[in-house]
C-alpha cells in the first residue's frame, strides 16, 4: 500500500493548528494531513495533544489559530454538527454513548429518523440500527436495552456503527482498542482494513505503537503539544518511532 | 453477508414468561400496588370514608396542582438539575394574574380572564427561561439559581400588593380551580373518557403496525388485548368515580373537575414530549451523558433552557389553578410546594442522578403523596405529624427503589 499518492487531493489538511486553554498551549502549530484510503496514526504520550488536535477536527473544540481544509477547500468547523456535515465521524475513546438510551437511540442521536407526523420513528431507527450493528457484530442481540447493560465490545460496536452509518469519508478513531480483548481488537483491525479499501481516510489515535504500526500508512508523532514529525511506516522501524515518542527525535530517513 | 434478525421470532426464546409477554413496567405496577394498599388501609382505618366517590373526587382535585408541576420536574431532574423555585413562581404568577384581573383589566369583561391567564403563563415561561439561561449559559448550578428564585419570587409576590390578598377573581377563571361549578358534568366526562380510550387503542394499533412493518417481534395478541383492556378499564373506572359524586344538594353528577382535566392534558402532552419528540430524546440523552449529547451535535444549552422554560410554564398553569381554587391571590400561595413536587417525582421513580424517569410514574408518585396526606387528614393527624410521616415515607420509598435498581444490574 503506497501512501500519499501524488496528484490526489488530500481529504484533510490541518495547517498550523494551535489551541490554548488559559495559558497552556495544548496544541502548538501542528500540521497533519490525510489522503483517501489512508490510515494516519497519531502517536504520543498521554497529554501530548493528540486527542485535543483531533477534537478540533471533530468540532468539539475550536482552534485558536490555524486552518482546516477538506478536499482542498477551507472548512469552518465550529461544532460537531459542522464536522458531521463534512463527512467527518469520530469514535471517541469514551465512546460518547448516552448510557440510559438503547443502541438505536444512540446510533441516531442528533440525527433521528422521523415519521411524517414529525414524531420519532423508533421502529425505523431500530430496523436501520439492527442492520448496521449486526453487520459489525453478528452476536449483538440486546438492541433495545440501555447501552449501560452492554459489554465493552458491544458498546464499541454501537459507537463504530454510529460512525459508519452516515457514510463517513473521514473517520477518527481515538484509542479504538483500549477497552477491548485480543479477539475484538483483531476485529477492529480487520474493519480498518476494509474501510481503507473503500477509500475512507482514517486518523488512528493511540499511545501504544504496537496497536497501530501494522495498520498505519503514515505515523505522526506529537510530544508536548508539538508535532515531532510525520514518517511513512515503511521507511522506519518501531524503534525509530519509539525514539520520536520518547525523545522527540526525528529519524534521519523521515519523509 | 449475514442474515439479519428479520423473522418475527420472539426475542426471549421458548420459555417466554408472563412478564416479558406483557412487556409491562414492573416498577410502575409496584407503585400502583402501593397506592392501592394505602387506599385500602385508609379505608379500613376511616370506616369506609376514604374510598367514597366524594373523597376520591377531592383527592383528584388536590393532586392536580402538584401533579401538573411534577410533569415538568421529571424533565428537570432527568437532565441532572433541580428546580427549587416552582412554589414561589406559582405564588408570584398567581398573584400577578389576580392583580391583573381584579385591579388592572376591567372587572366583568369577557376577555379579562383570557388576557390575565395568557400573560401569567407567558410570565411563568419567561421566568423559567431566565433561570435556565443562568444555568445553561452562565454555568451557575441550578440548585443555587432556583434557590435564589425561591426567595426572589416569594419576595416579589409579597411586594406586588405589599402583602395584601387580592379577591374576588373572575367567575370564569374560578372554574379552573374546580370549585362548585368547576367540573364538566357526566356527558362531557364520558366524551373525554371515550377520546382517551380511542387514543389508547389507536396508539397500540399504530405501534403494532409500525413494528410489524419491519418484521419485529410484537406482543402476542392476548397480551396486547389484556394490557389495553386494563388501561381502558382504568379509564372507565375513573370516569365512573368522577360521575358518582353529585354537586352538593343536587343529583347532578360533578364529572371530571376542570383542574383534573388540565392535569390530564399536561400528562398527555408531557408524555408525548418525552416519548416521541426529538426534544424529549435529547433531554434523556443529556441526563445520561451530557458530553455525549454535545458531541452528537445537540445544542445542550438550548435544551436545558427549554426544560426550565417548560417548568416555568407548568408552574404558571399550576399557579392559575391554585389561585382560582382559592378565589384569591395571596402572597403565600404555594409555599413549600416545591418539596411536594420533587418528592412526588422522586417517589415516582425519577432518579436524582439523572437520565431516568417517567411522567406516568411521577403522577402515580403525586397520587401516592396526596393519598397519604388526605388519609392522615381524615384520621385527624396533626399537620406536624403528617410531615414526619411524609418525610419518613420519602426516605423509605427512595431506599426501596435504589435497592431494587441495584439488584437488577
Image (tube, grey):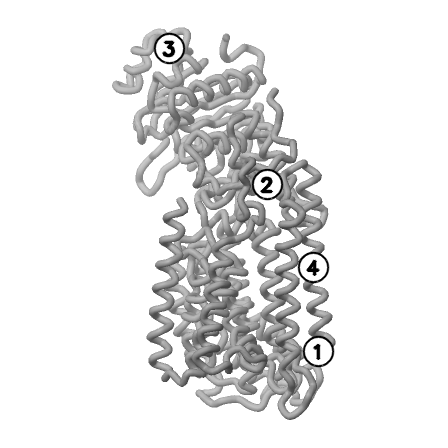
Which residue position holds label 4? B199
Q: Residue B90, labelled with which disc?
A: none
- Write the residue at 55% across / 30% down: A133
- Mark 3–mark 1 CB contact (< 8 Å): no
The chain identifier of the residue carrying mark 2 reads A
Q: Position of residue A159 (x, y in %)?
A: 49, 33
For the question of whether residue A207 can be seen, the reply is: yes
Q: Position of residue B174 (x, y in %)?
A: 61, 84
Foreground mark, 1 or 2, reads 1
Secondary structure state at the residue bearing disc 3: loop
Which residue position holds label 1? B186
Q: Residue A254, labelled with which disc?
A: 3
The 10 Å Cα crowd at callout 4, few under 14, some 14 to 19, many 20 or more, is: few
The 10 Å Cα crowd at callout 1, few under 14, some 14 to 19, many 20 or more, is: many
- Mark 3–mark 4 CB contact (< 8 Å): no
Residue A85: quadrant of the picture:
top right
Q: Are marks 3 and 1 on the same chain?
A: no
Q: Is residue B390 left or right of residue B257?
A: left
Q: Position of residue B156 (x, y in %)?
A: 45, 78
Amino acid at each position: 500500500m503506497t501512501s500519499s499518492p501524488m496528484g490526489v487531493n488530500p481529504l484533510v489538511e490541518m495547517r498550523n493548528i494551535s489551541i490554548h486553554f488559559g495559558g497552556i498551549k495544548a496544541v502548538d502549530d501542528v500540521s497533519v494531513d490525510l489522503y483517501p484510503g489512508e490510515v494516519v496514526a497519531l502517536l504520543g504520550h498521554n497529554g501530548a495533544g493528540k486527542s485535543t488536535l483531533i477534537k478540533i477536527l471533530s468540532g468539539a473544540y475550536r482552534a485558536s489559530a490555524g486552518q482546516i481544509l477538506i478536499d482542498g477547500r477551507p472548512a469552518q468547523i465550529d461544532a460537531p454538527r459542522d464536522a458531521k456535515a463534512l463527512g467527518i465521524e469520530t469514535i471517541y475513546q469514551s465512546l460518547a454513548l448516552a448510557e440510559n438510551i438503547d443502541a438505536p437511540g444512540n446510533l441516531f442521536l442528533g440525527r433521528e429518523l422521523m415519521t411524517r407526523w414529525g414524531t420519532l420513528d423508533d421502529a425505523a431507527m431500530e430496523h436501520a440500527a439492527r442492520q448496521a450493528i449486526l453487520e459489525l457484530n453478528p452476536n449483538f442481540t440486546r438492541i433495545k436495552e440501555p447501552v449501560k447493560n452492554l459489554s465493552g465490545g458491544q458498546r464499541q460496536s454501537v459507537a463504530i456503527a454510529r460512525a459508519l452509518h452516515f457514510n463517513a469519508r473521514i473517520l477518527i478513531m481515538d484509542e479504538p482498542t483500549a477497552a477491548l480483548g485480543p479477539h475484538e481488537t483483531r476485529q477492529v483491525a480487520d474493519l480498518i482494513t476494509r474501510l481503507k479499501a473503500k477509500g475512507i481516510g482514517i486518523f488512528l489515535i493511540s499511545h501504544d505503537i504496537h496497536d497501530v504500526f501494522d495498520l498505519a500508512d503514515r505515523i505522526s508523532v506529537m510530544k508536548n503539544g508539538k508535532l515531532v514529525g510525520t514518517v511513512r511506516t515503511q521507511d522506519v522501524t518501531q524503534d525509530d518511532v519509539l525514539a520520536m515518542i520518547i525523545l522527540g527525535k526525528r529519524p534521519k530517513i523521515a519523509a | 453477508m449475514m442474515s439479519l434478525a428479520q423473522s418475527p421470532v420472539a426475542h426471549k426464546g421458548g420459555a417466554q414468561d408472563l412478564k416479558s409477554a406483557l412487556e409491562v413496567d414492573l416498577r410502575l405496577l409496584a407503585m400502583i400496588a402501593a397506592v392501592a394498599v394505602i387506599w385500602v388501609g385508609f379505608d379500613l382505618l376511616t370506616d369506609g370514608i376514604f374510598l367514597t366517590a366524594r373523597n376520591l373526587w377531592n383527592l383528584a382535585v388536590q393532586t392536580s396542582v402538584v401533579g401538573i408541576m411534577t410533569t415538568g420536574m421529571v424533565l428537570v431532574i432527568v437532565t441532572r438539575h433541580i428546580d427549587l423555585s416552582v412554589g414561589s413562581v406559582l405564588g408570584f404568577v398567581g398573584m400577578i394574574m389576580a392583580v391583573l384581573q381584579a385591579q388592572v383589566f376591567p372587572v366583568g369583561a369577557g376577555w379579562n380572564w383570557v388576557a390575565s391567564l395568557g400573560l401569567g403563563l407567558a410570565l411563568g415561561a419567561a421566568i423559567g427561561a431566565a433561570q435556565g439561561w443562568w444555568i445553561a449559559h452562565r454555568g451557575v448550578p441550578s440548585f443555587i439559581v432556583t434557590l435564589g428564585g425561591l426567595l426572589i419570587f416569594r419576595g416579589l409576590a409579597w411586594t406586588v400588593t405589599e402583602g395584601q390578598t387580592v379577591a374576588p377573581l373572575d367567575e370564569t377563571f374560578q372554574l379552573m380551580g374546580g370549585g362548585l361549578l368547576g367540573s364538566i358534568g357526566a356527558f362531557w366526562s364520558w366524551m373525554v373518557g371515550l377520546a382517551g380510550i380511542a387514543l389508547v387503542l389507536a396508539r397500540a394499533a399504530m405501534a403494532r403496525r409500525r413494528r410489524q412493518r419491519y418484521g419485529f417481534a410484537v406482543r402476542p395478541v392476548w397480551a396486547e388485548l389484556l394490557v389495553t383492556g386494563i388501561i381502558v378499564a382504568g379509564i372507565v373506572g375513573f370516569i365512573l368515580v368522577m360521575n358518582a359524586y353529585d354537586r352538593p344538594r343536587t343529583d347532578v353528577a360533578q364529572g371530571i373537575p376542570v383542574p383534573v382535566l388540565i392535569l390530564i392534558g399536561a400528562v398527555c402532552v408531557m408524555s408525548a414530549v418525552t416519548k416521541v419528540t426529538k426534544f424529549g430524546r435529547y433531554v434523556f440523552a443529556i441526563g445520561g451523558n451530557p458530553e455525549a449529547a454535545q458531541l452528537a451535535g445537540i445544542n445542550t444549552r438550548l435544551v436545558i433552557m427549554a426544560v426550565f422554560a417548560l417548568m416555568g410554564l407548568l408552574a404558571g398553569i399550576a399557579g392559575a389553578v391554585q389561585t382560582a381554587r382559592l378565589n384569591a391571590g395571596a402572597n403565600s400561595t404555594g409555599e413549600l410546594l416545591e418539596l411536594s413536587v420533587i418528592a412526588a417525582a422522586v417517589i415516582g421513580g425519577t432518579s436524582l442522578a439523572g437520565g431516568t424517569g417517567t411522567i406516568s410514574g411521577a403522577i402515580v408518585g403525586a397520587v401516592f403523596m396526596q393519598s397519604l396526606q388526605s388519609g392522615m387528614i381524615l384520621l385527624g393527624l396533626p399537620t406536624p405529624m403528617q410531615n414526619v410521616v411524609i418525610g419518613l415515607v420519602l426516605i423509605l420509598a427512595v431506599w426501596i427503589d435504589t435497592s431494587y435498581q441495584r439488584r437488577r444490574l
